[in-house]
Amino acid sequence: MSRFRTPPGPVRPWRGELMAHLVSWVFNPIFYCTAYLAAMTVAHPGWWPATLQLWFWLAWVPGLLLLAGVRRGWWSDLDVSVLNERRHFMPWVVVASAAALVVTWAGGFPALLRLSSGAIFVWLALSTLIGRYWKISLHVGGAVGILWLTTIAFGAVGGALLVWVPWLVGWARLRLHRHTLGQVIAGAAVGTLSVALVWQAMGFSPWR
């Protein structure tokens, strides 16, 4: 009977790695921002001109730079995983977020949007500064930051719906060996700190 056994096939990649790639693609910080602003627009339909402007600076511009850079060979992948490439990519993203911050505050946008743009700018600025020397996780930092912003905007129920996302994203980044555990934890800390700093600066009242 042993003569008729099917010979073992080639070793396939573990499904967990494929899942980790999918998680990293789906939960890219650009998509976080887009989904968050879309939710804000649904909750506050009158805010759509403001959220559209924020989306342009915080998602469309970085996304265009990311895709164009990969196509031209500036970045090796959509994660901009090479530290030296990230040093060139991130300052432009910070500039775009600064433009969003100026538009938000100069335009007298609702306080919740000012809090959001401020927290995202601080997160990107801190991540860029640290990232010149140590590649902390932007995926996890973005997931944690959006989790806090969602909790502020939609309450504990809104936050509870997303509490699993940072854990899943952290697992994916570790599974793909994009970051060390320390870099994942540092990314989460920077995301939390950024929201806390702007929350404090606004006097704990983002709805005024």
Image: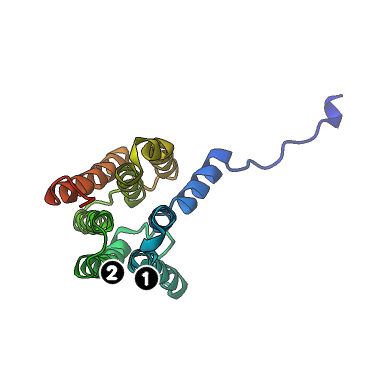
| Residue that label 2 marks | 96
Residue 129 in sight from this viewpoint: yes
Q: Earlier in the sequence, mark 1 or mark 2?
A: 1
The amino acid beneath tag 2 is Ala
| Residue 188: quadrant of the picture | top left
Q: Are marks 1 and 2 in contact (CB under 8 Å)?
A: yes
Residue 206 percent across, percent down from the top left: 22, 50
| Residue 171: quadrant of the picture | top left
Which residue is at a point 40% across and 44% down the rendered structure image? 173
Q: How many marks?
A: 2
Residue 154 percent across, percent down from the top left: 36, 44
| Residue that label 1 marks | 61
Rendered position, 204 above or below 160: below
| Residue 116: quadrant of the picture | bottom left
Direction from residue 187 to residue 28 in the image, left or right: right
Direction from residue 108 to residue 37 in the image, left or right: right
Direction from residue 185 to residue 65 in the image, left or right: right
> Dividing the image into 4 quarters, which one contains the N terminus?
top right
Which sits in the foreground, 1 or 117?
117
Which residue is at a point 44% across and 69% down the rendered structure image? 67
Judge the density around disc 1: few (<14), some (14-19), many (≥20) Cα neighbours within 10 Å: some
Residue 97 percent across, percent down from the top left: 27, 65
Which sits in the foreground, 194 or 204?
204
Which residue is at a point 36% across and 46% down the rendered structure image? 143
Query: Which secondary structure lies at badge 1?
Result: helix
Query: Which secondary structure lies at badge 2?
Result: helix
Judge the density around disc 2: few (<14), some (14-19), many (≥20) Cα neighbours within 10 Å: many
> Which disc is residue 81 wearing?
none
Marks 1 and 2, how far apart in space? 7 Å
